[in-house]
Image (spheres, grey):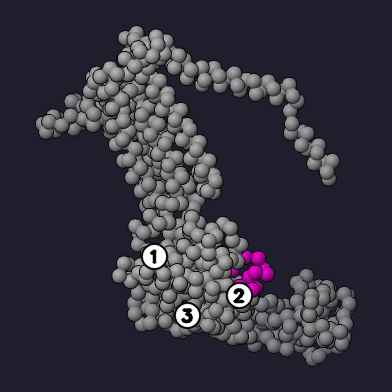
Amino acid sequence: MSAQHIKRRISTQESPLVTVTLIAIALVFMALFLVLPLVTVFIEAFAKGWDLYWTALKEPVAWEAIKLTFIAAGIAVPANLVFGVSAAWAIAKFDFKGKSLLITLIDLPFAVSPVVSGLVFVLLFGAQGWFGHWLQAHDIRLIFAVPGIVLATIFVTFPFIARQLIPLMQAQGKEEEEAAVSLGASGWQTFWRVTLPNIKWGLLYGVILCNARAMGEFGAVSVVSGHIRGLTNTMPLHVEILYNEYNFVAAFSVASLLALLAVVTLIVKSTVEWQAKRSGDILH
Amino acid sequence: MSITIQNLNKQFGTYKALDNINLEVNSGELLALLGPSGCGKTSLLRIIGGMELADSGSLLFHGEDIQQRDARERNVGFVFQHYALFRHMTVFENVAFGLRVKPKKERHNEAEIKRRVHELLNLVQLDFLADRYPSQLSGGQRQRIALARALAVEPKILLLDEPFGALDAQVRKELRRWLRRLHNDLHITSIFVTHDQEEALEVADRVVVMNKGKIEQVGTPDEVYATPATPFVYQFIGNVNLFHSRDHAPWSDEHGDAVAYVRPHDIDISRVAQDETALAVEVKLVRAIGSIVRVEVAADGSSEFIEIELSRERFDSSPLLEGDKVFIRPRQFRVFEAEAI
């Protein structure tokens, strides 16, 4: 019995040569495709020293782009937070007609290319679009303006929180909610006291991913923005413009902020995962 | 509080979970809903608790129709098979939950809540676990906490869904006895669902046997065991041997095509034919199980086994060996016509 056991363990182990080679390939690949680009961003950003880096960031146009990025994410993330929690709550805890259709619809932004999503908004709300005349008549500008950017960002980041919560809430079932109601709790009390504490780590995880995507979104926002400097440029769009103008230091300076955001996101994400594991929540 | 159920129906898609249920639950009694899985017993319990809605029929608590009231207004305590304790709250907070969510006017102050929770934890003998989390408790402890939590809001009716279903045999037995004692002290009208006939017969005042969405029989544990109303009850509660009139007419011939139902302990074995209706059989298997001896016999040329249970005393007075040729005759049996089965 024990001999068999030992043999089985050996048979699942590779020779040292294979082990080392595989690990080396993985490391080289990671260094080339993940670490090197990240390092390059910072090297290029600081290529001409601190002063130029600061100047590039202090530029009013750059500052406007940073502000707009935060505004777009600041609206899109809370909106999707409310929507994601309600959708996951409805899907996981209730049975209704059209449930699978709703799940499919939530996934739609993942399935559609961001450029196409942006184009859809232009076709709907643009000057030549379906609602274009009506909007113009009422003097409302969506496309090539901030509202369009917010709309596109919400659309693209739509599934993140809901997708994170649905499997979690389905796994938890609805018995705790039923118990709460039978003990006299109202719908709100049940949600705040029972449901929300049970999903808090999953929710936080979803918010982090949603925020990262909202700030980094390029395709959809690029189509609806019109690239008006200081007005409708987000950080990723601003980087592209600067780069196309051969202003590499400035381009990489702004890019370094986005990269920094990504690093912070990763750290927060790992902390949340670690905390969630400790408190025994299931994340995936 | 008494419960009256009249002409209750519930359908899930094409599946009829409850088919015209009529039932009267007396105030203060402990009632068991007994049946195989899928018989509708849990659906019935959930409808009484307000977690499901019936398609038609009426449900009255103490003569008052409560179908329009939702679960939180019914004043019903519910205990779930898998406990459904709030995993992020301590045992104390779990039990206190029902007291804390009361509307402001009715809510007790913190000291009173504390007193009541500890009183309940003492009742279930688990006061020392107040600061633990549900994941740190054993199954039996969790179920007792779930019961304390349900009792905290002073329900008029207590509903228990397979309360011991997820526990191992030893703990089950202990909790069963404990629930019976608790009910004797508190006298809350209680209904519990089970698929375990032994549990139902041991704990309940009355047993409701259900099958395929219908009630087969309502009676005391003794009644459903000794005088089963239908073939299903005969087979579901206790073991039974079937003698078809085609194979052995003398015991079931008065009804034409019929089947005689005989309990294993209602069969006499003899070396000589007792009378002309006795059946000649061969002993195939003898097994002593604790205080009883189980003998399996088969008629000549038949592959169907007949199960017989003898007390050890009775067996010892005339021991049998495998291969012995003997005669059997039922002391007591009940005949059902074939189409009723």
In the rendered picture of this protein, how many numbered marks are placed on residues?
A: 3
Q: CA distance from mark 3 to mark 1?
A: 22 Å
Residue A88 highlighted magenta (yes or no): no
Residue under label 2? B176
Relative to A15, does residue B48 appear above or below in the rendering?
below
Relative to B276, does residue B52 appear above or below in the rendering?
above
**Which is more toward the observer, A240 or B230?**
A240
Q: Amino acid at mark 1?
A: Arg
Residue found at x 80% / y 41%: A5
Residue under label 3? B188
Residue found at x 38% / y 55%: A191
What residue span does the magenta drawing correspond to? Answer: B162-175
Relative to B89, does residue A87 appear above or below in the rendering?
above
Q: Earlier in the sequence, mark 2 or mark 1?
A: 1
Secondary structure state at the residue bearing disc 3? loop
Residue under label 1? B100
Secondary structure state at the residue bearing disc 2? helix
Residue found at x 82% / y 74%: B287
User: Is residue B305 visible from the viewing direction of this image?
Assistant: yes
Residue found at x 42% / y 36%: A208
Q: Earlier in the sequence, mark 3 or mark 2?
A: 2
Could you tell me which quadrant the C terminus of chain B lies in? bottom right
Q: CA distance from mark 3 to mark 2?
A: 16 Å
Tag 3–tag 2 contact (CB < 8 Å) = no
x, y percent for residue B303: 78, 70
Q: Earlier in the sequence, mark 3 or mark 1?
A: 1
Q: Amino acid at mark 3?
A: Ile
Please rate how many residues cluster around mark 1, counting C-alpha atoms within 10 Å: few if below 14, some from 14 to 19, many from 20. Answer: many
